[in-house]
Amino acid sequence: MAVLVQYRMATTAQMHRLIALEVRVEQTRRRLAKLRQEGIIDRITLPQTGRTRVWYPTRHGAQLAGGWPEMRGRQPPRGAVNRTAVRLKVEHELTVTRPRWHS
């Protein structure tokens, strides 16, 4: 969750590489789905890239993460307003974030 709040959004593959490379990607998908069921994160599916899913924190999730010790001293987290807002920002956000994942 803290990763999504810091980066604003990430694909399933990016999340897997960052938080759970030692397990199968299916386990990462299940973890993300559980957080989605709890209303902490949500996702959109990018039509131009097949079934690539992009995950982002909801307002509720960003508020929760804002109280965590590891988030102190950082800019207050913002959750997504709605899926349309995410779709409008996704290309830019993933372009800006992508180099960070490969370092």
Image (spheres, rainbow, N blue to C red):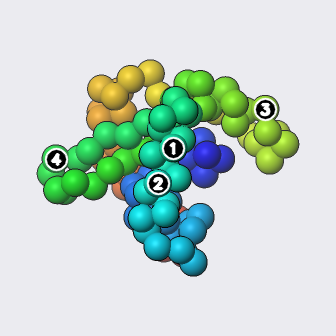
Could you tell which of marks 1 and 3 lies nearer the N-terminus?
1
Q: Which amino acid does label 1 sit on?
A: Lys
Query: Residue at image x 57%, y 78%?
Result: 22
The residue carrying pointer 1 sits among few (fewer than 14), some (14 to 19) or many (20 or more) residues within 10 Å by Cα, namely: few
Question: Which mark is in front, 1 or 3?
Answer: 1
* The one of 37 and 83 positioned closer to us in this rendering: 37
Q: Can residue 97 be seen in this view?
A: no
Query: Residue at image x 52%, y 29%?
Result: 39
Is residue 17 toward the left or the right of residue 13 in the image? right
Q: Residue 75: horizontal and vertical position, in percent?
A: 70, 35
Image quadrant in which you'd find residue 83: top left
The alpha-carbon separation of the residues under discs 3 and 4 comes to 35 Å
Is residue 48 toward the left or the right of residue 69 in the image? left
Q: Which amino acid does label 4 sit on?
A: Pro
Circle 3 residue: 67
Question: Which mark is in front, 3 or 2?
Answer: 2
Circle 1 residue: 34
Q: Can residue 10 be seen in this view?
A: yes
Element type at mark 2? helix
The alpha-carbon separation of the residues under discs 2 and 1 comes to 6 Å
* The one of 94 and 50 positioned closer to us in this rendering: 50
Q: What residue type is labelled 3?
A: Gly
Disc on res. 47: 4
Is residue 36 toward the left or the right of residue 53 in the image? right
Q: In this view, does 74 lie above or below 49?
A: above
Q: What residue type is labelled 2?
A: Arg
Element type at mark 1? helix
The alpha-carbon separation of the residues under discs 1 and 3 comes to 21 Å
Could you tell which of marks 3 and 4 lies nearer the N-terminus?
4
Could you tell which of marks 3 and 2 lies nearer the N-terminus?
2
Q: Residue 63: horizontal and vertical position, in percent?
A: 67, 26
